[in-house]
Image (tube, coloured by chain):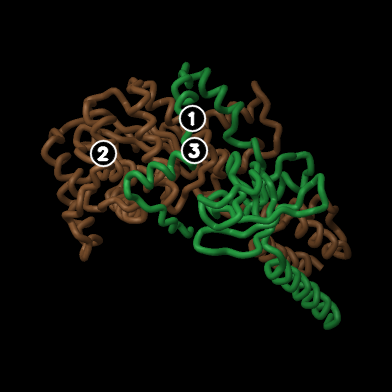
Chain colours: A brown, B green
């Protein structure tokens, strides 16, 4: 009889993996096991749940809602280190431009949407937090000389969000705590052990992301992937994707070796340019400059 | 003993059939973002039919380059509303608001059901904020930066841009 139960459990976990409505499956399994004897209903359900629990947790299991809270915290850390530039007109322009780009990306919708903020810093830097908060420094914007070039910076950052690079920097152990602990069962109330455990996992996740994003940088392949996304986004929006190369050329001249900004966290512009150019064959480098695009760029960002 | 095996096999086959049957049946998805417009056509320029809310459960009727035509069954009215929503606003997980049912809690651990408002949530944020003495004022202000679709359209038109919505995940 034990064998029967074991076989059913195997079949049951297969169903759990294949099915989208596991609550229903639990009931079905419970009923199927009814004649099995020996185990109580609770024990049976628990056994099935245990087999399902063994499925490893990864960044893909983080829901957009949880990603949103992670992103807000990373954003708060960024804004704790950098003062925002409060020129309303400039920030609004960046938000209209960025939102337009996000609509043609693979991920136009995030839990709380995309929002852009200029950082009052001479560093050449830009950050994207999970779920859609994007920061660009004045130093970075000064490397641009056209709307297309600003679009290239934002498109690269949207690429990081689309590809969930921030979430991928979180160690699996934190995600497992967040998704399998008592936190999910709804007993995590203020002051409880579960809440303390969850807050620690949250804090560690934020540190995983900020230390990667601000200090060590994402992997070379992640950066190249974000560049690829940027090229696709720029083209879909009607911008010249060569603007990304143009931006990198300027950055190459301005980045200080040993600097604590993009110089530290990104592969050398030279390497990125080489990879990007492979995807740009057949696309005209010198496209006409649209006067209205250039004049609105100049009137808002030209004097930063 | 032979009869016993036969029973076992029948039970296993039944379970497998149930699984396949469920997969072939209607495809249900949950709205995984705060809110998102349901549009008359599969484009961000489409007329807004209604606004879908987080955890709304929809039936997917058709998929087309990143967009899904869905049907939302109203809790209040018997009539269902149909329209297009971008796939990036939907999740295959069943996102449920109430965690009262123990079966729901257990299946949340399996990853097929997600509990709204659990895990990293507002309360965890409040604890984190307090422990680290972090100021969220500017993050909150940043989230207030919004852009209307009309403004985007004007921006696209004036700048000789396109809204070539690709984006299939």
Q: Residue at x 75, y 51 (%)?
A: A46
Q: Secondary structure at mark 2?
A: helix
Q: State which quarter of the image contains the N terminus of chain B.
A: bottom right
User: What subunit carries mark 2?
Assistant: A
> Along the horizontal axis of the image, is A161 left or right of A51?
left
Q: Position of residue B75 (x, y in %)?
A: 79, 46
Q: Residue at x 37, y 27 (%)?
A: A78
Quadrant of residue A120 within the rendered picture: top left
Per the image, the residue denoted by label 3 is: B148
> Along the horizontal axis of the image, is A40 left or right of A224?
right
> Along the horizontal axis of the image, is A61 left or right of B142?
right
Could you tell me how far apart the alpha carbons at marks 2 and 3 are, in whole angstroms?
Answer: 34 Å
Per the image, the residue denoted by label 2 is: A265
Q: Is residue A171 above or below residue A83?
A: below
User: What subunit carries mark 1?
Assistant: B
Q: Secondary structure at mark 3?
A: loop
Mark 2 crowdedness (10 Å alpha carbons): few <14, some 14-19, many ≥20: many
Could you tell me how far apart the alpha carbons at marks 3 and 1 are, in whole angstroms?
Answer: 14 Å
Could you tell me how far apart the alpha carbons at marks 1 and 2 are, in whole angstroms?
Answer: 26 Å
Question: If you read the primary sequence from the N terminus, does the residue marked by circle 3 or circle 1 appear first?
Answer: 1
User: What subunit carries mark 3?
Assistant: B
């Amino acid at each position: 009889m034990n064998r029967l139960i074991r076989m059913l459990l195997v079949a049951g976990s297969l169903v759990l993996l294949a099915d989208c409505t596991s609550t229903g499956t639990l009931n079905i399994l419970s009923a199927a096991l009814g004649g099995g004897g020996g185990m109580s209903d609770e024990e049976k359900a628990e056994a099935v749940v245990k087999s399902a629990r063994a499925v490893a947790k990864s960044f893909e299991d983080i829901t957009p809602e949880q990603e949103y809270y992670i992103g807000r915290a990373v954003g708060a850390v960024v804004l704790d280190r950098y003062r925002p530039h409060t020129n309303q007109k400039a920030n609004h322009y960046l938000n209209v431009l960025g939102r337009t780009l996000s609509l043609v990306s693979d991920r136009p919708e995030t839990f709380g949407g995309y929002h852009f903020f200029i950082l009052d810093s001479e560093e050449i830097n830009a950050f994207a937090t999970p779920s859609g908060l994007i920061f660009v420094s004045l130093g970075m914007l000064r490397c641009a000389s056209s709307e297309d070039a600003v679009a290239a910076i934002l498109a690269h950052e949207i690429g990081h969000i689309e590809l969930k690079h921030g979430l991928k920097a979180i160690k699996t152990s934190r995600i497992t705590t967040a998704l399998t602990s008592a936190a999910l069962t709804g007993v995590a109330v203020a002051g409880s052990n579960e809440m303390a455990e969850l807050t620690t996992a949250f804090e560690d996740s934020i540190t995983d992301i900020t230390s990667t994003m601000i200090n060590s940088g994402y992997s070379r392949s992640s950066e190249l992937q974000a560049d690829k996304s940027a090229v696709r986004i720029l083209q879909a929006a009607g911008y010249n994707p060569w603007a990304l190369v143009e931006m990198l050329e300027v950055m190459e001249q301005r980045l200080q070796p040993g600097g604590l900004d993009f110089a530290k966290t990104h592969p050398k512009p030279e390497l990125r340019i080489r990879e990007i150019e492979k995807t740009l064959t057949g696309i005209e480098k010198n496209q006409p400059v649209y006067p209205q695009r250039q004049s609105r760029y100049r009137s808002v960002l030209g004097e930063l | 003993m032979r009869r016993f095996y036969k029973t076992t096999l029948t039970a296993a086959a039944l379970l497998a059939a149930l699984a396949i049957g469920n997969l072939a049946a209607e495809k249900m998805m949950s709205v995984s973002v705060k809110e998102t417009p349901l549009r008359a056509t599969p484009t961000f320029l489409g007329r807004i039919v209604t606004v879908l809310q987080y955890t709304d459960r929809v039936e997917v009727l058709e998929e087309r380059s990143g967009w899904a035509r869905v049907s939302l069954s109203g809790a209040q009215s018997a009539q269902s509303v149909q329209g297009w929503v971008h796939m990036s606003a939907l999740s295959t997980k069943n996102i449920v608001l109430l965690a009262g049912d123990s079966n729901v809690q257990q299946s949340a651990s399996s990853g097929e059901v997600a509990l709204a408002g659990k895990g990293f949530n507002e309360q965890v944020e409040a604890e984190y904020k307090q422990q680290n003495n972090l100021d969220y004022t500017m993050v909150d202000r940043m989230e207030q930066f919004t852009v209307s679709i009309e403004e985007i359209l004007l921006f696209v038109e004036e700048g000789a841009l396109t809204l070539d919505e690709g984006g299939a995940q």
